Amino acid sequence: MLLRFTKMHGLGNDFMVLDLISQHAHILPKHAKQWGDRHTGIGFDQLLLVEAPNNPDVDFRYRIFNADGSEVEQCGNGARCFARFVQDKRLTVKKQIRVETKSGIIELNVRNDGQITVDMGAPRLAPQQIPFQADAEALSYHVGVGAQTVELAAVSMGNPHAVLRVEDVDQAPVHELGPQLEHHPRFPQRVNVGFLQVVNRQQAKLRVWERGAGETQACGTGACAAAVAAIRQGWMDSPLQLELPGGKLAIEWAGPGQPVMMTGPAVRVFEGQVRL
């Protein structure tokens, strides 16, 4: 059978989006891995599935597969693309959309200027909720990686993140430390790794090594986690702007227990069909 899909991106973090409401198919991890290959498939960072909700209080269900076939809990850039997609496809006329994810319910707000604000919910900071192996919650942790020890913050935005402050993001060892920390035994569900360069109290630069995808052009949940870490440790103030390789995201966070609000663009690239 042929499935219609849309290729989209949020700041260069790219997605294949499938409407599984008006068309029906059973998508498996092997399909994500096959389609995600940039040489023999469509090529993407994540596959996004738009499904009917299980919860009657929400509008849609949102599932995410990495290009390696692993299913993950959350994707902030994908959430913005999700909102743009369901409006473009006339699956809803709402400007405020409630979406069920593997890690809970998020709210999407399509603004009149075309930007999309996502209520990502409150960050989870307790080690067992991230999950991260530590005796007690702290602002930062020391983690041994090979012969060195790095200092990092650990935050969950529905998915686990480690945030390291660096002097120069362009010189940061993203492709060395990223995969080592992704598979570190203290992160039992693996982890996304952010490398943060603080420019001033309202601006910073960020690169992210994502679980199952490697370094991406942008990571929405990674930007939220980095903002939380920077505000908690007194490096930055809300609202703030993060510059990623693919572009800029605006983040607001009022403090512990409060939701993280992320605003940025979502772009449709092309439409296609794939044989299942």
Image (spheres, rainbow, N blue to C red):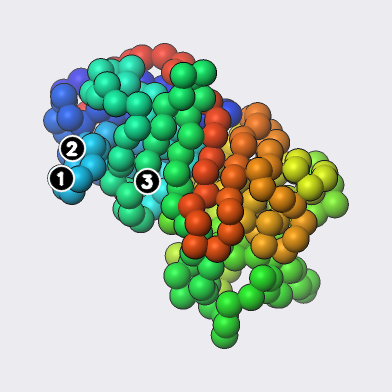
Residue, x 30% and y 40% (percent of image)? 98
Reading the chain from its start, which is encountered first: label 3 or label 1?
A: 1
The residue indicated by pointer 1 is: 56
Q: Say which amino acid is labelled 3.
A: Ile
Q: Say which amino acid is labelled 2.
A: Ala
Residue, x 18% and y 48% (percent of image)? 55
The residue indicated by pointer 2 is: 52
| Residue 27 visible | no
28 displayed left or right of 73? left
Tell me, for residue 20, which label it has, or none. none
Q: Residues within 10 Å of mark 1 (few under 14, many from 20)?
A: few
Residue, x 20% and y 45% (percent of image)? 57
Where is residue 65, by image quadrant?
Answer: top left
Q: Secondary structure at mark 1?
A: loop
* Residue 45, percent from left and from top: 48, 37
Where is residue 30, by image quadrant?
Answer: top left
Q: Quadrant of the N terminus?
A: top left
* Residue 220, percent from left and from top: 54, 42
The residue indicated by pointer 3 is: 106
Where is residue 46, by image quadrant?
Answer: top left
Outermost residue to the front: 254
| Residue 17 visible | yes
Q: Say which amino acid is labelled 1.
A: Pro
* Residue 226, percent from left and from top: 64, 52
Reading the chain from its start, which is encountered first: label 3 or label 2?
A: 2
Q: Is residue 1 above or below residue 65?
A: above
| Cα gap from disc 1 to disc 2, whole angstroms | 10 Å
Q: Secondary structure at mark 3?
A: strand
Q: Which sits in the foreground, 152 or 177?
A: 152
Q: Is residue 209 above or below residue 270?
A: below
* Residue 263, percent from left and from top: 54, 34
